[in-house]
Amino acid sequence: MPGFRRWSKSKFKKNPESSFKLLAAVLVITLYLLIKEFSNPTVRTARVPSKGAQIQYTDWQNGTDKADPEKAAAVREAMRYTFWKYRQNAWGSDDIRPVTGGNYSSRNGWGAFIVDSATTLAVMELWEELTLSVPFITSIDFSTAEDLVDPFETTIRYLGGLVSLVDLVDAGSIPHNIVTPEERNQLVQQAVVLANKLGPAYDTPTGMPFPRVDFNTTQGVPDPPSVFLEDPEKPQYQHPVIGPARTGSNILENRVLTRLTSNNIYAKNSTRAWAPLVWNKWISPWEGMVDAPIDIVTGAPVGRQRHWDGGHDSYYEYLVKITLLAHPSDPYLAVYKQTFLDAAYSLRRYLSTRSASAPNHTMQHLFIGRQDDQWYLNRQGHLACFAPGTILLGSKFYDQPYLRTFALALLEGCHHTYTSTPSKIGPENWSWIPKFGFDDPVFTPDTRRQQKEWAKTGFWATNAKYKGRPEYVESLFYAWRITGQTRYRDWAWEAFSAMEEWCKAPYGYAQLTDVYKVKPGDWPGKGEERWVDQQESFWAAETLKYLYLTFSDAEVASLDNWVFSTEGHLFRMIR
Ligand SMILES: *[C@@H]1O[C@H](CO)[C@@H](O)[C@H](O)[C@H]1NC(C)=O
Ligand SMILES: *[C@@H]1O[C@H](CO)[C@@H](O)[C@H](O)[C@H]1NC(C)=O
Ligand SMILES: *[C@@H]1O[C@H](CO)[C@@H](O)[C@H](O)[C@H]1NC(C)=O
Ligand SMILES: *[C@@H]1O[C@H](CO)[C@@H](O)[C@H](O)[C@H]1NC(C)=O
Ligand SMILES: *[C@@H]1O[C@H](CO)[C@@H](O)[C@H](O)[C@H]1NC(C)=O
Ligand SMILES: *[C@@H]1O[C@H](CO)[C@@H](O)[C@H](O)[C@H]1NC(C)=O
């Protein structure tokens, strides 16, 4: 594919037709929201959830849509272990240290674990645990923060967790004696306080959010110097810049908050935040995909990175999910759908490559790389394993058989990274030699270890950590619920068994230093270095939730009625 390295002369040129389209779009959005505000001020009063969409498989044979009670119970037990170790040793901090029982707070210290894990407790019907969490959540003081607040992380973990809990109450999934009507209203109020405090983030000429908000001064601010200290290679630009995921993954959470409050400001600000991506006025060589990073003041791309991996991922995810979540009368659903389809086909055409046969591994696997300027980077991160699930969702909803085949092939690639390591857990990121089109790939196996891994499996790890991430099992959950093929349930069980065996630590589930070296004997001393003493809240919010829902009855949190956020919080599809 010679197009890969083409230097586009259209670098950062405005497309005049699109400028007009953007203006027209913003006008119509405003008009639509105004009309909606005045024509239907009572969206709050509980509407009966209608059947949303036909997403899940229907032709289940031999009762395979029923729960696998033993496996579901094992995952639920892992959640109980995770919860109670945190409860006994780190209650109120953001996260526990699973090896030593210490704690740390990197999410403003509001108790990220408690808020992020509550919807998983609800889905698993762990009522005793949820009864402990809810009073804590309703008494968090979201109006103050000592540190600068990251609007993206705060929206997906805290705001999403809050409004999802309310939706679960309203749908009758949480009994009223567990969350009382009064507590339900307090949860909405907490979401309002938090969303309003995040408001100044959107106060930019483009509407794309600032990297941080200072709650003391109620102003949006650039990245703090610590970000550049941690990553000395991060370039500094004239103005703050943002990636597609950070500006394009606020719309689900904020739409739900608008539905719960009848206040359109949340829908409006989050729509404006991603409008420069959706109605992209910069010439981009690939349909549907945007160049990043993007200057939040001018809206211009200042780099030419294009991919679906970390930093860009959930923008593409939210394009399809908003079309499931939003009311069909929303005038922009057709644009979101087309942009998603364009981006998914661009991903397939330009960024997915098959691995070449390796000396001891003839099978070829489909992986997704990334484009940086004129270079194709033959490297994929674990984060990008969300793509099979999201594309499968789109393929079903939009009836696109080619995308289904593509998604399942990508999922097989992620599966291969899991089954190829001694721990049976895939690495944080990896590279391969593309079979076609590249005589001289950017990454090649350089060390002896990389050469060995490549010869044996056709790829090699470029970062061998496992961070407790959900993306692979998340995609297995979608594959199971959408195709009904039991192998995806089997793969999920293999992944869970490996996590149970290698990640379970004295105070929770630890991250792995190296998925190729997990036996205590692989390490000197007591072997505890094989663990990283961290447990991010997405372990409970997502990884365990998706595993559980793969073994539960297929009607639990059905994809026909619920839309899952990028943090695994589920929102009612009210269409
Ligand atoms: C259902 O069970 C029958 C009889 O055991 C078997 O032949 C068939 O392949 C099964 N179908 C599926 C989809 O597992
Ligand atoms: C967190 O750890 C510190 C020691 O580093 C300890 O003083 C504190 O009590 C712990 N916090 C919680 C909530 O357990
Ligand atoms: C906000 O004010 C508090 C109290 O004065 C201070 O401790 C904290 O550092 C301030 N936060 C920021 C981000 O400046
Ligand atoms: C909405 O955006 C405006 C800037 O356009 C900002 O001033 C306001 O605080 C935001 N409100 C919310 C709730 O996001
Ligand atoms: C590859 O296969 C050859 C011959 O079958 C064997 O000698 C060699 O050890 C294998 N190498 C690896 C890395 O597995
Ligand atoms: C792979 O991991 C390294 C180390 O964490 C990181 O610097 C790099 O950005 C990652 N690359 C991808 C494609 O995820």
Image (cartoon, rainbow, N blue to C red):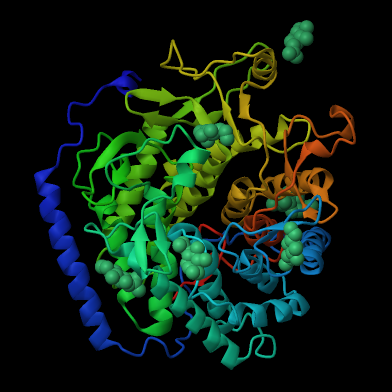
Rendered view: 324 above or below 32: above
Does residue 563 appear in this view? no
Q: Is residue 444 left or right of residue 555?
A: left
Residue 343 spot, x, y in % from top left: 35, 43
- Residue drawn at x 30%, y 44% is 294
Residue at 39% over, 75% down = 196
Q: Is residue 192 visible?
A: yes
Percent across and percent down for residue 507 are 82, 56
* Residue 184 x %, y %: 56, 86
Tell me the quadrant of the picture where the N terminus can be found. top left
Q: Residue at x 38, y 68 (%)?
A: 217
Question: Which residue lies at the image location 49% right of the left edge and 51% below the top edge?
Answer: 390
**In front here: 132 or 70?**
132
Vertical relation: 543 (above or below) 85: above
Residue 259 appears left or right of 555: left
Residue 16 placement, left or right of 165: left
Q: Nearer the viewer, residue 306 or 238?
A: 238
Q: Is residue 476 left or right of residue 101?
A: left
> Residue 541: x percent and y percent?
63, 61
Quadrant assignment for the C terminus: bottom left
